[in-house]
Image (tube, rainbow, N blue to C red):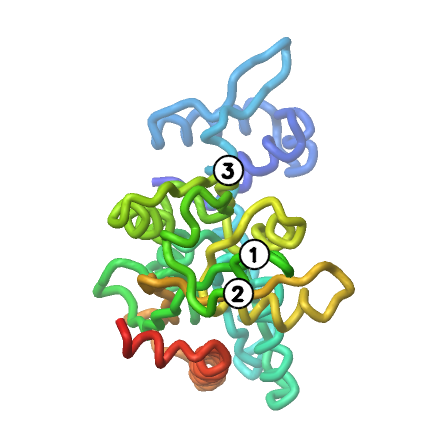
Amino acid sequence: MLKLWHLTVIREVINTGSISKAAQALGRSQPALSLVIADAETQIGYKLFRRLNGRLQPVPEAKYFLERAEEILEKMRNLERFMVGGSNQPFQIRIACMPVLSEIFLPKIIADFAAEHKDAHFYLRAQPSARVHESIASQQFDIGFAENPNKSELYFTKDFSLPTMIALPEGHLLSCHSVLTPKHLDNVPFSTFLPEHELTIQLRAAFESVDAKLNIPFFLQNAAAQYSIVENGHAVGFMSLLSVWLYQENWEKSSRKKIIFRPFAPQIYQNISLITPRHRPLPLISQLFSAKLEKSVHNIFSETKSQFQLDELEELN
């Protein structure tokens, strides 16, 4: 079984680029560290380093190993600080969130909550949705916010279904329509999510069902990456109601070119979940923050749906 010392040694070798420098930093001999690395490699079943031009180079898998090792070592440092500081230390609210919502959406809610709870401490980490699911399933974080995970006995979820919208550059010919369909968008350049993303798969199916051509020159990681593409008229965008709110709340206040939004039919939904660990009781402060986050999402959802009259569209569907 790997031990914390294995992780510490491997991290130091990767960060310093040599066993000799790592040995000096850790106060150990080079042979001792070489044995630790060899033992770790034996346990995980593959080499973490290779010799290249006389230098020790980490293999690609070692980068992933380092990332996970950093998480574990950081948790141990937090535990040590907590134990040294005593049990009267305020609880830290640990949040894992998909990247697109970690830069503006979550910090805004954190700032509002911190104004009401002066003693609250926060730890916010941006992670892909799959990693958020893992972080909560392993009971390492208090709150996760990400695209819908699979059902699990390791966590609870509160799910939100967010309608999707078409983003158009200001002045686009299609802005005359109150609702846009695949027929309107036939062969129009699109920016959307990566090909394997569930929303892109559903979008493609909607176009295929009416023999419309879906033209996607821009496959992007998330909705925020679409804003500049759409603003500059290179393509129309495809994003959820929450991403629409993010744009209106922030980018629209700048002097940049504007985006306008239209509902898409047939309606496609992005499913987002607030996730909490099942087997570790949350501190009261984390429960309060979770409730505030849930309320904020509901408020944003309700206000933005009303703005675009989406309830009427859903009734028609």
Is residue 76 at all visible to an observer of this figure? no
Q: CA distance from mark 2 to mark 1?
A: 7 Å
Check the image and report above or below for 145 versus 71: below
The residue most toward the bottom is 116
Q: Position of residue 145 (x, y in %)?
A: 43, 66
Mark found first going from the N terminus, 1 or 3: 1
Q: Which residue is mark 3?
A: 217
The amino acid at mark 1 is: Leu
Which amino acid lies under the numbered mark 3 shown in the image of this protein? Answer: Pro
Which one is in front, 229 or 298? 229
The answer to whether residue 68 is above or below residue 107 is above
Q: Is residue 168 left or right of residue 185?
A: right
Mark 1, residue position: 173
Q: What is the three-letter code of the residue carrying label 2?
A: Cys
Q: Are marks 2 and 1 in contact (CB under 8 Å)?
A: yes
Expressed as whole percent of the image width and height from the top left, the position of residue 89 reads 58, 79
Tell which circle, 2 or 3, labels the residue nearer the N-terminal end: 2
Q: Vertical placement of 196 versus 46: above or below?
A: below
Secondary element at tag 2: helix
Q: Residue at x 26, y 71 (%)?
A: 317
* Quadrant showing the N terminus: top left
Mark 2 Cα within 10 Å, few/some/many (few <14, many 20+)? Answer: few
